[in-house]
Image (spheres, coloured by chain):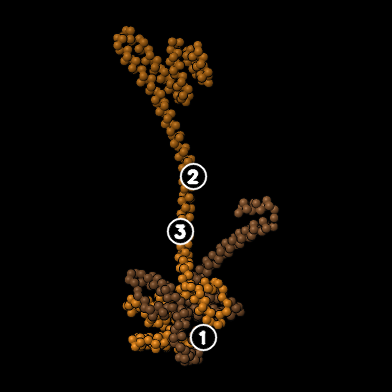
């Protein structure tokens, strides 16, 4: 229930929806909401790692370490979760506009442009190209493996077809 | 007879010149002197060398004549050595001069030719090669720089720290989202990482403004309020603040009260933002 409300807000920020959304969280159980949020949130260790790496870069000149509050870490994780919801909803809208049912990577990139995160688009495209290249390499390797399997199958089928004792002796020798 | 026969074939091409001298000018007893003169003719250029050798031969004849007459009449046997000693320098002087002249001429010829022929093309070729090498170096440097930039950009996103299972769960929470391609699942963790980095940057800026070394939730809330890009989840974060305020102890309530003025400012911002999409 609270998820849908948040999604509606994310989808279209309208005052009527906001007015309707305000009383909704009151009836919801706070403990259930917290537990659900904790389950769906991203792992804290990874978020902490990312945040501290960025802070070390930003505050590198000063040299001192920066302390991050637990509430701040929770806020980071929750904001990331909300970001995923918002991005997936926007990408879904882009996909439907183009009359397709499967969300594509290009839809996600266009969604980022609409969300005014244009800075993210270029590095993501470069990483996508590399990912595709890697997939192509993996596919070629998979084909090679399939060929090897076929060869093995052929080798296995040949002795089954032939039932001569000399061939049996050869098979035993090979084994 | 044998040495004379052996000498004739070597002297054959220059037979005319020596044939003219011995029978007319020189006695048979001094044939050795004439024979000594011939090799010089063979070894030197004909015109200049011949004239020089003729002069040398005349000088030698004069010297040979003098000692033949003097020793029995004027000089004792002990001083014959002095006369013999006088012969070598005179005998060796002309070949030294001729040899020196020949050597100088040969050196000039040898030195001149390779300098002109050998050094000109290598200079031009060397210059061209140097220019080409410099161009190649520049091109290689540019290529290396581009590769480094690409590598740095790519390595940042290859870690895949965020697990895909969590992202799938979060995406499946939306009923509208039906089908997703593998590439989308790859793009989402990268986008999340970039989002978190941006949020930390803005939050840290706010903390620095307040001269603090500790990132707090208020910093993140303020960053979200200040940045237009983060409008989409401003309300939800504030709601979470309200929930935590309700659930927590009085100290947390006090913190929430302190946060109220920060919350007041963003409350006006969304109102200002609402008419824009309507228009």
Tell me whether circle 3 and circle 2 mark residues in contact (CB < 8 Å).
Answer: no
Q: Crowdedness of circle 3 by 10 Å Cα count: few (<14), some, many (20+)?
A: few
Residue located at (42% from left, 73% from top): A45
The alpha-carbon separation of the residues under discs 3 and 2 comes to 30 Å
For residue B175, the mark is: none
Above or below — where is B109 with respect to B236? above
**Residue B226 seen in the figure:** no
Residue located at (47% from left, 26% from top): B45
For residue A4, the mark is: 1
Residue located at (46% from left, 19% from top): B38
List the single residue furthest toward the top: B73
Give the SS element for disc 2.
Answer: helix
Q: Chain A is drawn in which colour?
A: brown
Q: Does mark 1 fall on the same chain as mark 2?
A: no
**Residue A59 seen in the figure:** yes
Residue with the mark numbered 3: B141
Q: Does mark 2 fall on the same chain as mark 3?
A: yes
Above or below — where is B250 with respect to B84? below
Depth check: give the residue in front, B4 or A132.
A132
Q: Say which chain tag 1 marks.
A: A
Number of numbered tags placed on the structure image: 3
- Residue B211 lies, in percent from the top left, at 32, 78
Q: Give the quadrant of residue B228.
A: bottom left
Q: Does mark 3 fall on the same chain as mark 1?
A: no
Side (left or right) of A155 relative to B212: right
Q: Which of marks 3 and 2 is nearer the N terminus?
A: 2
Depth check: give the residue in front, A121 or A140.
A140
Residue located at (47% from left, 12% from top): B24
- Residue B81 lies, in percent from the top left, at 32, 14
- Residue B124 lies, in percent from the top left, at 48, 47
For the colour orange, the matching chain is: B
For residue B121, the mark is: 2
């Amino acid at each position: 229930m609270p998820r849908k409300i948040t999604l509606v807000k994310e989808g279209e920020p309208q005052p009527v929806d906001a007015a309707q959304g305000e009383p909704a969280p009151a009836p919801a159980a706070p403990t259930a909401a917290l537990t659900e949020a904790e389950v769906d949130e991203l792992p804290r260790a990874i978020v902490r790692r990312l945040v501290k790496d960025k802070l070390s870069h930003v505050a590198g000149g000063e040299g001192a370490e920066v302390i991050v509050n637990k509430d701040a870490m929770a806020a980071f994780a929750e904001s990331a979760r909300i970001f995923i919801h918002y991005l997936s909803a926007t990408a879904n809208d882009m996909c439907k506009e183009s009359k397709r049912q499967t969300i594509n990577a290009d839809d996600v990139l266009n969604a980022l442009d609409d969300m005014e995160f244009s800075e993210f688009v270029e590095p993501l495209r470069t990483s996508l190209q590399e990912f595709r290249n890697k997939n192509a390499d993996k596919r070629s390797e998979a084909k090679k493996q399939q060929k090897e399997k076929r060869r093995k199958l052929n080798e296995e089928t040949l002795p089954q077809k032939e039932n001569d004792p000399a061939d049996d002796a050869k098979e035993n020798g090979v084994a | 007879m044998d040495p004379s026969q052996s000498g004739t074939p070597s002297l054959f091409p220059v037979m005319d010149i020596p044939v003219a001298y011995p029978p007319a000018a020189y006695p048979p007893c001094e044939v050795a002197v004439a024979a000594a003169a011939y090799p010089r003719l063979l070894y030197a250029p004909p015109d200049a060398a011949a004239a020089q050798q003729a002069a040398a031969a005349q000088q030698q004849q004069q010297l040979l004549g003098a000692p033949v007459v003097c020793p029995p009449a004027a000089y004792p046997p002990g001083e014959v050595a002095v006369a013999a000693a006088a012969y070598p320098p005179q005998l060796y002087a002309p070949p030294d001069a001729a040899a020196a002249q020949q050597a100088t001429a040969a050196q000039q010829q040898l030195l001149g030719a390779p300098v002109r022929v050998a050094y000109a093309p290598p200079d031009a070729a060397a210059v061209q090669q140097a220019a080409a090498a410099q161009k190649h170096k520049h091109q290689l440097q540019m290529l290396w720089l581009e590769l480094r930039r690409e590598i740095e950009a790519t390595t940042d996103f290859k870690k895949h720290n965020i697990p895909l299972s969590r992202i799938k769960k979060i995406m499946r929470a939306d009923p509208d989202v039906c089908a997703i391609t593998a590439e989308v699942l790859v793009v989402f963790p990268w986008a999340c990482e970039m989002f978190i980095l941006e949020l930390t940057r803005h939050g840290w800026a706010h903390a620095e403004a307040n001269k603090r070394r500790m990132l707090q939730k208020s910093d993140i809330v303020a960053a979200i309020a200040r940045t237009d890009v983060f409008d989409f989840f401003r309300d939800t974060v504030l709601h979470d603040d309200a929930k935590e305020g309700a659930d927590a102890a009085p100290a947390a309530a006090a913190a929430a009260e302190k946060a109220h003025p920060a919350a007041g400012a963003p409350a006006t911002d969304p109102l200002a933002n609402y008419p824009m999409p309507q228009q």
